[in-house]
Each structure stands twice: as structure tokens, then as C-alpha cells.
Amino acid sequence: MKPAASAGQFLASARSRLLPASIPLRFFGAAVVFHLLAWLALLPGAQALPRFDGGLGWPLAALHLITLGVLVMSAIGASLQLLPVATRQPVRWQRAPALVWWLYLPGVAAVTLGMGLGLTPLLGAGAVLVLLALTLFAWLLAANLRGAQGMPAVVVHGWAALACLLGVLFSAAALVAGWLGWTLLPRATALALHLPLATFGFMGLLALGLSYILVPMFALAVTPDERQALQSASLAIAGLVLAGLAAAGLAPRPLRLLALGLGAAAIGLHLRLMVQALRSGMRRQLGPSFVLVRLAWGMLVLSLALALALVLQAPLAGLPALFSLVLVGGWLLSFVLGMLQRILPFLVSMHLAGRGRRAPTPSALTAERWLVLHARCHLLALPGLALAIGFDSPVLGLAAATVGGLGGLALAGFFVELLRRMRAPAAPAG
């Protein structure tokens, strides 16, 4: 195993492959705004939240403000910036990422507003924009992966995530068509395909793959063993293939049980590599951001246990809503927000370097008090939503959403302060 490059070395050696700062920052800034809007959408949706099991309304809107607005928006920004660096090649069409943003942002707004208000024409129009944006993003991602050099585990995760994204687009189109009165796939089949491919597949594989870059980089740790990372990826991909076959109606319960077993093995191996990286790292104090990352890893394991309960049809009231909360809010959202809090100041610092002035360090760009407040609110809001589901209590759901909204404001404060410090006059070099 080779020592991982530090944050500065990682991008300083590849500054020619950095996108203009405005491109990743617009994606990350939009994710911060959608994060706040998701919590606000839960306020009118608190009544239906505890027993939510699909269907138009504000709980569905809040869910997609998280998945499309925060998770996928962040994934696009991170992959467009980090994968060219990891694969040692620049983005070939620098105007295309901006076009993705201009299509995707109004598309997500229209989709989620259409869901919340039950306006299917608005939902359909937004879905068209989202599908166009993600198709263009898939093309950019494929072009980058096709010429990849190095980091084979990251590249394999990227190709598998891309394949899952195509399945997500197809199943999403089928679901939207159903709301508009057309039939592409039976609704149950489309849902059974959409859920695992969107969460464990596209977003999950991207999160696992980019972790092999981000965790060692921020912890100043050794690079995880490539062979074991590829083994983890192979197990995860095999599990997703079985989940897809089960969604198509081929031996649903046995294949889903086998898929969960393969997924558990993949995640166990991945988390062992992450723990080894953190233990070998020279930087031990990683702040509130890695509190969220560690929480996310625990919620990932719990999501598999709840998925098993769903497959076995355990008689637990509110199980679908609890599973969605743990998988999307506990695992993916916690992980993305934790990493975003590290990526943003680090990326800004690298963009400010090399201009004849001494660039501020990532820590100097970070308003820690906002992150502490956000972490506290996040760690209170998620259990609050779980209690609301467990006790079938809209009042608890409303209180949890209010606390989450306060956390959303804190995260927005962190982002605004980052931009302010980014524009502040720099100190003269040396």
C-alpha cells in the first residue's frame, strides 16, 4: 500500500484538470438549498409522514428533494470534478457541465413541486428536464471513464454506477408515465427496480467508489488495498444484478435474500478498508463532518437489516417509511453532507492557490460553528423522524422537521461564510 496524497498534493499535482470553481460550486450550492427545502417540505407533510408508503404528496416531494436535489446534485458536482483528477484526464467539454446544471435545477424544482401539489403536468415537464440533464451527465461520465488511467476500483464503481443510472432513468420514466396515465411498466415492477438501482446502485456505488479517494485524502492515510476494493465492488454489482432480476419477477424472495447477502459482504469488506484507512491516517481529528460519515456507515448496515425485514414481510407498522428514512436520510444524506463539508473548503483552497498570493487553508475557510450546529440538528432530527414513525405521531414529525430545518439553515450559513471568505483579500505570498 502506498501513502495517500494529502489534500494539497492531490489537486496541486492536477490543477490543469480542475474545472472553473463556478461549476462545482453551483452544484454544491444548489444541493445546500435543496437540503433546506426538503426539511421545509416535511412541515406540511408531517401528517402523512409516519405511514408514508409512496404516492404523491409532500413526503414524496421531500424524499425527492433529498435524492434528486441533494444527493444526485452533489454526486454530479463531485464526480465531474473528482473523477477527472482520479483518472488523470481533463473534462473535454467544459460547457457541458453548466448545461447539465441549467437543465437539472429547474427540472428538480418542477418535479418536486409537482409531487407536493399533486400537479402531474408540472411533474411530467420537470421529469423531461431531469431525464435530459442526467442523460447528458451520463455521457460526460462515460467519456471520462472510457479514457481512465489508474485507480481501477474507482473506475469500476463508476461504470457500475453509470449502468445503474440508466436503469434508474428508465424506471423513473415508467413511474412518471404511470402518473400521467400511460403504462410503460407495471407500477410495482418499476418501483422494485427504481429503489435498489437509485439508492444502493447509482448513489451507493458512487459513494463507495469516491470513498477510496476522499477518506484516505482527508485522513492523510494509506491507500486502501486495490484488490480488496475490487472484490467489494464485484460483490455489490452481483447483488444489484440479482435485485434487478427479482424486480423483473424471477424468484423474487430467494434472489432478494441472496442479493442482500452479497451486499452485506460487499459493505463489510468496504467498511473494513475504511476503518483501516482511518486508523492509519496521520490526521485523527476530522471534525463534525466525519461524525456524519461514521453515522452514515452505521446506517448503511442498519438499512440492510431493514431491507431484510421488508423482504421477509415483518409485521412492523411503518416499516417502509423507516427503511426509507434510514437508507436515504441516515446513510446517503449523512454521508454526502459529511463529505461536502470537507470537499467545499478544500476545493476553494485549491482554486485560490497559485495566484501569487498565499491561499487560505481549508480550515481557515471553514466556519466550524455552523457545522457543529448542523451536526447537532441532524443528529436530533433523524431520531425524531424515527420516533414519529414508530409512534405514528405527526407532532413528533413536525418537531423533527423543524429541527432539521434549523440544521439546513446552519449548513446554508456555512456555505455563505465559505463564499465570503473565498472573496476576502488574500495574504501576500511568503
Image: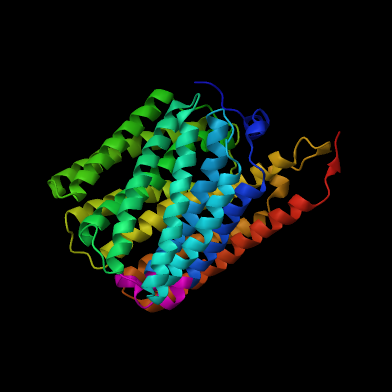
Q: Is residue 399 above or below residue 175?
A: below
Q: Residue furthest left?
A: 251
- Residue 390 figure quarter: bottom left
- Visible residue check, residue 388: yes
Q: Residue furthest top?
A: 1
Q: Is residue 210 left or right of residue 12?
A: left
Image quadrant in which the C terminus is located: top right
- Residue 33 figure quarter: bottom right
Q: Position of residue 153 (x, y in %)?
A: 42, 29
Q: Position of residue 134 (x, y in %)?
A: 45, 50
Q: Position of residue 423 (x, y in %)?
A: 77, 52
54 inside magenta stretch: yes
259 or 403: nearer the eye?
259
- Visible residue check, residue 302: no
Where does the magenta region start and end? 41-59
- Residue 319 figure quarter: bottom left
Q: Is residue 182 left or right of residue 251?
A: right
57 inside magenta stretch: yes
- Colour scheme: rainbow
395 or 242: nearer the eye?
242
Q: How many marks?
A: 0
Q: Position of residue 158 (x, y in %)?
A: 43, 36
- For image coordinates 47% across by 49% down, the residue present is 335
31 or 110: nearer the eye?
110
Q: Is residue 80 left or right of residue 7?
A: left
